[in-house]
Image (cartoon, rainbow, N blue to C red):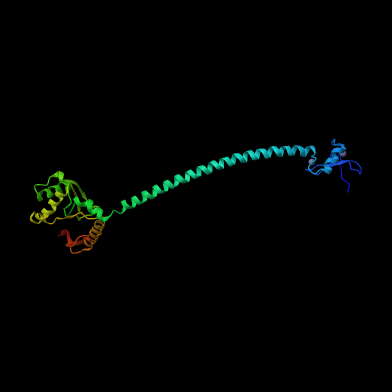
């Protein structure tokens, strides 16, 4: 099939020199695009010499420009990726440090959450528990007065803190924790606690014991709740409540009489 010159749109006849664009492969009369016979010969015989039509030549230079821009952008992106990688490495390092700090804190928190029982007993060595003190007004002052009755050597300043343990439950006297200022004051109270039995009827019901551990305190809490429900279930109008609490660390039993309902 006869081909046509892209420029003049006339059929290319045999014997008339033509050139073909390397890019779009369109055929042109050599004369139509100003190419002389020598150039036609060179493009035919030397593979490294290619001829481009005006349109494709423009496109090629555009592609070259585009390629340069893309390459420049690629280099910029590569630089940024390198910077991000470097930042990531340093972030990862910092993250590792933070993770280790969190791990450290977690183990410290665990220690706080579950205090060693022996340690707590040691810290509680100045503590005294007082049971069956009738709850009312000025309980702290009354507790201080009761303690001072045991020995004239005990002063207000020997009692650092007086705390009622647990929530108020109707007709139940909460155990009272007394934190003494020093061990000798505590020992004096413990040694003299037998005197309570010889005091008034109300005071003779009071019991004094060593401080309880957290585990023992929760045991006591459930015993109080149990006594409370037994009292609620009692229809006879009389309930003598007796709770037995056994310490894991010490031999013997503490008997708590929480009150007599008549
Ligand atoms: Zn032509
Ligand atoms: Zn072309």
Residue drawn at point x = 22 percent, y = 52 percent = 122
Residue in view at x 74 percent, y 39 percent:
60
Residue 224 vs residue 39: left or right? left
Q: Position of residue 257 (x, y in %)?
A: 16, 59
Instruction: Judge whether 261 appears above or below 58 on screen.
Output: below
Q: Which is more toward the observer, 39 or 248?
A: 39
| Along the line of sight, the residue nearer the viewer: 228 or 207 | 207
Image check: 55 left or right of 159?
Answer: right
Quarter of the picture containing the C terminus is bottom left
**From this viewpoint, which residue is outermost toward the top?**
34
Kindly tell me whether residue 216 is visible in this rendering.
yes
Q: Is residue 166 among the parts visible in the rendering?
A: no
The image quarter in which residue 30 lies: top right
Horizontal side of 68 relative to 230 (left or right) equals right
Instruction: Point out residue 258 in the picture as x, y percentages from the top left corner.
Output: 18, 58
Residue 28 drawn at (x, y percent)? 85, 40
In this rendering, is residue 13 above or below 253? above
Taking the view exactly as shown, the residue that stands out farthest to the left is: 198
Would you say 76 lies left or right of 58 here?
left
The x, y position of residue 46, in whole percent, is 81, 43
**Quadrant assignment for ligand 2:** top right
Residue at the location (48% across, 43% down)?
Answer: 90
Q: Closer to the camera, 45 or 132?
A: 45
């Amino acid at each position: 099939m006869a081909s046509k010159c892209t420029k003049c749109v006339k059929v290319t006849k045999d014997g008339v020199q033509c050139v073909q664009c390397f890019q779009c492969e369109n055929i042109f009369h050599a004369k139509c695009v100003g190419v002389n016979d020598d150039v036609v010969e060179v493009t035919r015989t030397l593979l490294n010499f290619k001829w481009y039509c005006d349109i494709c030549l423009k496109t090629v230079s555009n592609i070259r420009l585009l390629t340069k821009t893309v390459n420049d952008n690629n280099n910029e992106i590569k630089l940024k990726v390198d910077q991000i990688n470097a930042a990531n490495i340093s972030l990862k390092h910092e993250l590792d440090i933070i993770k280790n700090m969190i791990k450290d804190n977690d183990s410290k928190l665990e220690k706080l959450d579950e205090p060693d029982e022996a340690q707590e007993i040691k810290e509680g060595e100045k503590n005294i528990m007082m049971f069956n003190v009738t709850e009312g007004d000025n309980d702290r002052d009354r507790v201080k007065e009761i303690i001072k009755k045991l020995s004239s050597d005990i002063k207000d300043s020997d009692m650092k803190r007086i705390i009622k343990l647990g929530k108020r439950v109707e007709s139940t006297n909460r155990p009272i924790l007394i934190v003494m200022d020093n061990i000798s004051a505590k020992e004096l109270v413990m040694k003299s606690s037998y005197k309570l039995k010889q005091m008034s009827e109300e005071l003779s019901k009071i019991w004094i014991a060593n401080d309880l551990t957290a585990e023992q305190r929760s045991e006591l809490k459930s015993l109080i709740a149990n006594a409370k429900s037994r009292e609620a279930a009692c229809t006879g109008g009389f309930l003598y409540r007796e709770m037995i609490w056994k310490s894991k660390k010490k031999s013997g039993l503490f008997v708590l009489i929480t009150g007599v309902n008549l």
